[in-house]
Image: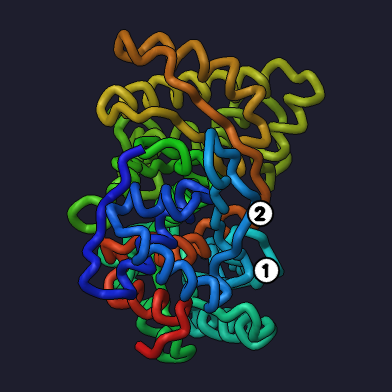
Amino acid sequence: MAVQRYSTDRGDLTRTAILALLGTVGPLSRTEIARQLDLSPATVTQLTRELMGHGMLEELELEPSRGGRPAQKLGLIGSAGRALGVKVTTDHLVIVDVRLDGEVLGAWERPVDTTSPRALDDLVDAVADAVSQIAADPPLLGIGVGVPGSVEDQAIGTVNAPTLGWQATPVGDRLRRRLDLPVLVENDVNALAAAERLYGRGRTHRDFLVLTIGRGVGAAIVTDGRVYRGARGGAGEFGHVPMLAAGPVCGCGNQGCLESLVGAAGLVGAARTRMELPEDAGVADIGRAAAGGDAVARAVFAEAGAVLGRAAAGLINVVDPEVVVVLGEGTADWAYWQVGFDPAIRAHLYPGRRDISVEVESWDDTSWAQGAAALVLATPFDAAGAAGEQGRLVRARLIGSTP
């Protein structure tokens, strides 16, 4: 895997480069670090000694040698830092406390009405309460927030999210002023891609696609190891690809978007015309019917899977990823989606891409918030500084220096 080379003019950037390498490819020997970052062995020895002194690296097993002394591998210490991740939905917040190595230490859920004039105050109060409940060790590096909308600059954190009823909402600014901590705010699917880059498929793939299905439909495009955000932070609105000129009205106000057909509301609407459902039915009700052998419920999922598969093939043909990762609440019923998805995606892929791997990962309610935490936890592994000033503050907290 090609590794970016970093400036060695400043020691903090060089230390960050070492953390970046170990964080993305796993344990390595000092010799391998020096070779991949184009540093002298003496520099690597000095800097890794400092990082071990800060409690951020540890010596692991000896690497077998073909001759001469075996090499000692170095790896990250997961307890070197932690982050809080916050997932915002229309009616509740999920907050998780996550270590540097991805282990979840705690989780909270809070009700919220994002259309209320007090929504932002309630969000800030909930996060402040969570901060007050966590231990001081390992140190809290910052707060990551995932939202179902666009964020032009994650280090500023101004949110435009029609599904939340938020327009130019200063989420990042309000949290920073209240908590005096680094805060990064991002589209929730892009946040999941950051987590995949740090802990999942991104450790072995630098070009991949994340698709999410659930209440909505989303995508994140990772190219050369970085999430593609677009000119205004709005890239990846896969759910709003137009599919039917006269289709159902979507939450964005347009007609016939992909999300209006295969998102939660679209699935329930399609099922309601063909089967008996309770007034307050949701996708889980259709899933239970499918699991019980209901042919109509299974057909609803299969037809939605075929629509999603055709749309996904078009996106794959455009961006040419190495692998596709499917995530989200909707994966609970993936066995029924897959019946329509698999043949549709293979049939519409460009020749030569029809063998692309589509990997569906397990899901629970904290996964979105874990992705938000990864915004912060991935920052020390980004010496290029994509997170701006907030990223610098996170790195300063991690190495124990003053900003």
Residue position for label 2 = 365
> Taking the image as drawn, is residue 173 in sight?
yes
Where residue 62 appears, as percent x and y from the top left, is 62, 48
Q: Residue at x 21, y 58 (%)?
A: 232
Residue 57 in percent (x, y) is at 55, 66
Task: Name the foreground residue: 305 vs 312.
Answer: 312
- Name, please, the residue furthest toward the left: 231
Q: Position of residue 102 (x, y in %)?
A: 60, 58
Q: Quadrant of residue 276?
A: top right
Rendered-image quadrant of the C terminus: bottom left
| Mark 2 → mark 1, Cα distance in angstroms | 10 Å
Label 2 SS: loop
Q: Residues within 10 Å of mark 1 (few under 14, many from 20)?
A: some
Q: From the viewer's perspective, is residue 396 above or below residue 177?
A: above
**Residue depicted at 60% across the width and 64% down the height:** 58
Give the crowd class for mark 2: few <14, some 14-19, many >=20 residues within 10 Å.
few
For residue 109, the mark is 1
Outermost residue toward the right? 292
Asked whether the viewer can see residue 91, the reply is: no
| Residue nearest the observer in this picture, 354 or 275 | 354
Q: Mark 1 and mark 2 in contact (Cβ < 8 Å)?
A: yes
**Judging from the image, what secondary structure is the residue with disc 1 in?**
strand
Residue drawn at (62%, 18%) of the image: 299
The type of residue carrying mark 2 is Asp
